[in-house]
Image: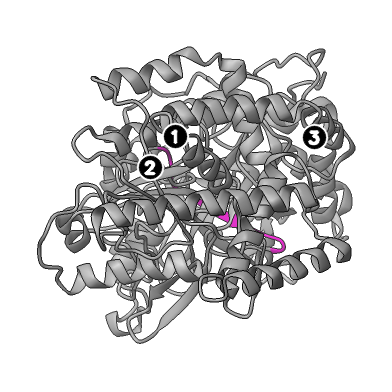
Amino acid sequence: MPCVGDWLNSPLSIVQGIFAQNVPNSDWEKKVTEYFKEKLKENNATNWVPSLNDVPVHYLKPNSLVKFRCMVQDMFDPEFYMGVYETVDPNTNARVLHFGKYRDVAECGPQQEIDFNSSQTVTSERQTFYCVPVPGESAWVKEISFLTEPAYVSASQARVSPSTSYTPSRHKRSYEEDEDMDLHPSKQKEQHLGKSCCCGGDIHGCVEPKRLETEASAGHHVISPNCSPPLDLNFPLPGEKGPACLVKVYENWESFKVNDVLEVFGVLTVDPVLSIVNSEERDSSALDAMECMDTAEEQRVHSPPASLVPRIHVILAQKLQHINPLLPACLNEEESKTFVSNFMSELSPVRAELLGFLTHALLGDSLAAEYLILHLISTVYARRDVLPLGKFTVNLSGCPRSSAFTEHLYRLIQQLVPASYHLRMSIESMNQSRFIPHKDYTANRLVSGLLQLASNTSLVIDETQLEQGQLDTAGVHNVTALGNLITWQKVDYDFNYHRMEFPCNINVLITSEGRSLLPSDCQVHLQPQIIPPNMEEYMSSLLTAVLPSVLNKFRIYLSLLRLLDYSISDEVTKAVEEDFVEMRKNNPESVTGDDLHKMLLVARFLSLSAGQTTLSRERWLRAKQLEALRKARLQQQQSVNGNEL
């Protein structure tokens, strides 16, 4: 069992030790990364690291090691900082080298000043990501991540949570008080008199230097001290909770992009001294206003109060394949392969139970339940030119309008998938909501929209409440954006003078009374076998009846099957082609190339749903059967309702 020592509580002291042993050798940075990588491998030590997803910022020790599961919402411009700098004691002329990496401010000892003209100074570059919690992350993901050991960890490796509380040296203030202190740094400055002073304004004219901001990017970080509007944390979805963070990345930042989901391990800083520095720069700056490159709004957005938007200086970061805490983070490791093998051996009963569960949720319709399973495990596995392969948007038509059926169905889906969002489609929401992210050039940031979602998010669109009305320009753009998302799996972000395509991988389920106004890959008309007198009570009882262990198996099943590879042998490919030719001979008008594509897609996900990573003759025939039943149902409904479908 790893010892919760300095590497967790005081990582900068570890960095200092490695730095002191290896200077002037530049390998010290690589050795720091290797040290923490090895520490986190020891006996599942990652579970010892406090998470910003679970623990409020004010309970975490500043400058301690933390982790954060997040989505990259925006990328700011690269910034320069003093990677290595030298201090001098004016009395003794003693010189000491320091590192500026993993810090917001450069530290000076008593009676020391920074020698800006030192030949030892190294200017380095780092990238800042604005990161938010994964949009639409399900409550069960947070609960399992915090409360339990992941299922794939041996039961003998009992989790021992580190203490995430500490006794601060001052009375702990609320967030509101912290914000007031950060927005009015003069109050905070009074508390810091006699402790540590900061250098602001002209860094070459520094008086009483104790700590110096290490950022040297163009302009100054100014936060309006008086009439600033409330800080917008820029979450893509309304009602989201959790911290937004400025994540400072030092290596390989070019491998990450906007909307990537990351897990980062790094040094937490919530230093209120940053607000003092920024305020003093504003008050004492001698620069002409025309020379200042950054606007006040940009400075406010890029340097928000540290108590509201903490900083994480990344030591290690990895892109996540998924965010399901019941699965191993990476399926390629030996321990993970054992977990996958064991689960696949019991896949058949899990699928049968899930099919039964979803059949009840869809009011006794087993065919619709089959297609819902295929939809929930679908994913874009490749792109051929502009065509996304693997998308499987389902339009579930025939949904009851008056019973809030979609609302309750969504709540069940929310219990099965790691991230989701329920979009209630109405004239008002289409006209007033912001779907497409756009660039705010005044603040120099990407303003989020509803469609800025992480990969594999389940988006449930409810058309059952849609009434007649007039879409305005914004509404038309929003409907167009939904159509592009469904058809091309991309969102065109608005950069004012041009639009930029951002590919995505979003599972879209549309519920409607008749055929959806939006495009879809597959329409399944719901045929309820039961009409519950109380829909809410009926749906709630379904969840209550499922054991937590069974529910967790459903969650593993749906996440795991998305990650499996799939192939079709040459022999089966030839058999499918011959079969399709025969189908065209028998019914040339109703069987098209699109039908073949759809059947192959159904066969793919039908095979994966059974744990088979290659197509068999049996699964191909079953796919044809399901498609025949689905089409027959649509034709039957169309003959009843005329051209409604």
Q: Are marks 1 and 2 in contact (CB under 8 Å)?
A: yes
Residue 547, percent from left and from top: 55, 13
Write down the residue under mark 2.
526
Callout 2, which amino acid? Leu
Residue that appears at 54% across and 53% down: 628
Q: Nearer the viewer, residue 313 or 20?
A: 313
Write down the residue under mark 1.
365
Above or below residue 119? Residue 558 is: above
Callout 3, which amino acid? Val
Quarter assignment of residue 634:
bottom left
Residue 479, percent from left and from top: 29, 67
Callout 1, which amino acid? Asp
Q: Counting other residues with Cα less than 10 Å from the Cα at mark 2, is it few (<14), some (14-19), or many (20 or more)?
A: many
Q: Earlier in the sequence, mark 1 or mark 3?
A: 3
Above or below residue 64? Residue 576 is: below
Is 319 in the magenta?
Answer: no
- SS of the residue at dot 3? helix
Image quadrant where one finds the C terminus: bottom left
Residue 506, percent from left and from top: 50, 56
- Left or right position of 446 against 297: right
Q: Are marks 1 and 3 in contact (CB under 8 Å)?
A: no
Image quadrant where one finds the N terminus: top right
Q: Earlier in the sequence, mark 2 or mark 3?
A: 3
Mark number, residue 340: 3
Span of residues in magenta: 242-252
Q: Earlier in the sequence, mark 1 or mark 2?
A: 1
Query: For the residues carrying marks 2 and 3, which lies nearer the camera in this image?
Result: 2
